[in-house]
Image: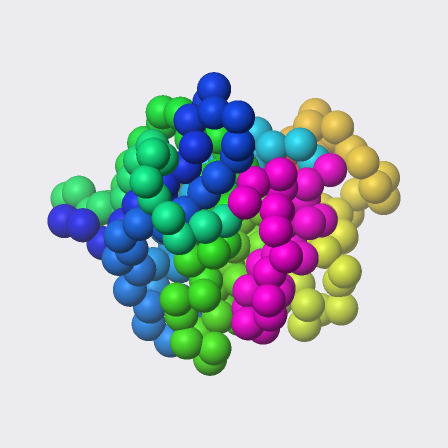
């Protein structure tokens, strides 16, 4: 079943100009989130690792400008956004449901990584102003993701973890994770993270049948697991 779809028109690899335009969009939104926002965030997570890191700040700035409805200067990320689709190639990305599970279907052809994430960004203008902040927050969260864009990504995307991090007074997910695992080094290697996780996990299991303690232990294990995931990604 189709849950969301984004059609992109773009200049070809050997074209002398760099262009991008939007085609058909099916981006359902519910309370600022929903399948449309998940698809856009998935496009960002899938393609942003392939762009020059020097473009990251400009891309984040573009997201905020589109959220506020500002006039967008062109080009951005060396590509010009336009309405005309004549002579441009076509790429389609979808979010579908198969047997109760979400699946991203990314069409990989001539579209450059910049063209894909720019199209996702310009789609923000189609949403009501009240819905844009939540959509942009998901897309900014997707910028940080490194890994396969699948079920783990969706769990990460829709979790409330970042809100908890802010509520606890941490400047980032990484600083929260370091504290949870009791690691003093700001840049621990993977082996140190895994070793500390195993050590704390062994000491977490209780020797009691108290249900309240079991709930606290389950929460602690969840925090340790999330902290490990953040530092290893």
In the image, farthest residue toward the top: 14
Task: Specify the quadrant that holds the C terminus.
Answer: top right
> What span is in magenta?
54-80
Q: Could you say where residue 119 lies in the image, as x and y percent from the top left?
A: 45, 48
Q: Could you say where residue 93 lies in the image, as x and y percent from the top left?
A: 31, 41
- Position of 212 relative to 173 (above/below): below
Q: Residue at x 17, y 43 (%)?
A: 98
- Position of 62 relative to 45 (above/below): below
Residue 229, can we see it? no
Q: Could you say where residue 132 lies in the image, as x and y percent from the top left?
A: 48, 70
Q: Could you say where residue 147 lies in the image, as x and y percent from the top left?
A: 51, 33
Q: Residue at x 42, y 58 (%)?
A: 123
Q: Nearer the viewer, residue 213 or 225?
A: 225
Q: Quadrant of residue 171?
A: bottom right
Instruction: Tell me if 105 is positioned left or right of 17 in this view.
Output: left
Instruction: Tell me if 218 is positioned left or right of 4 in this view.
Output: right
């Amino acid at each position: 079943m189709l849950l969301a779809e984004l059609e992109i028109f773009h200049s070809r690899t050997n074209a002398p100009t760099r262009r991008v335009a939007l085609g058909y969009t099916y981006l359902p939104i519910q309370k600022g989130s929903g399948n449309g926002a998940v698809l856009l965030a998935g496009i960002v997570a899938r393609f942003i690792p392939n762009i020059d890191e020097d473009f990251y700040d400009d891309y984040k700035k573009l997201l905020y400008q589109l959220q506020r409805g500002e006039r967008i200067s062109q080009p951005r990320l060396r590509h010009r956004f336009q309405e005309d689709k004549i002579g441009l190639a076509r790429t389609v990305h979808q979010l579908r449901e198969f047997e109760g599970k979400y699946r991203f279907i990314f069409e990989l052809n001539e579209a450059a990584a910049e063209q894909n994430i720019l199209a996702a960004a310009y789609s923000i203008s189609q949403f009501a102003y009240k819905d844009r902040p939540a959509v942009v927050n998901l897309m900014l969260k997707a910028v940080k993701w490194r890994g396969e864009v699948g079920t783990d990504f969706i769990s990460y995307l829709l979790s409330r973890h970042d809100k908890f991090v802010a509520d606890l007074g941490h400047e980032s997910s990484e600083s929260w994770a370091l504290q949870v695992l009791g690691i003093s080094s700001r840049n621990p290697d993977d082996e140190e993270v895994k070793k500390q996780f195993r050590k704390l996990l062994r000491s977490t299991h209780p020797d009691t049948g108290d249900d309240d303690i079991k709930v606290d232990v389950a929460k602690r294990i969840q925090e340790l697991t999330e902290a490990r995931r953040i530092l290893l990604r």
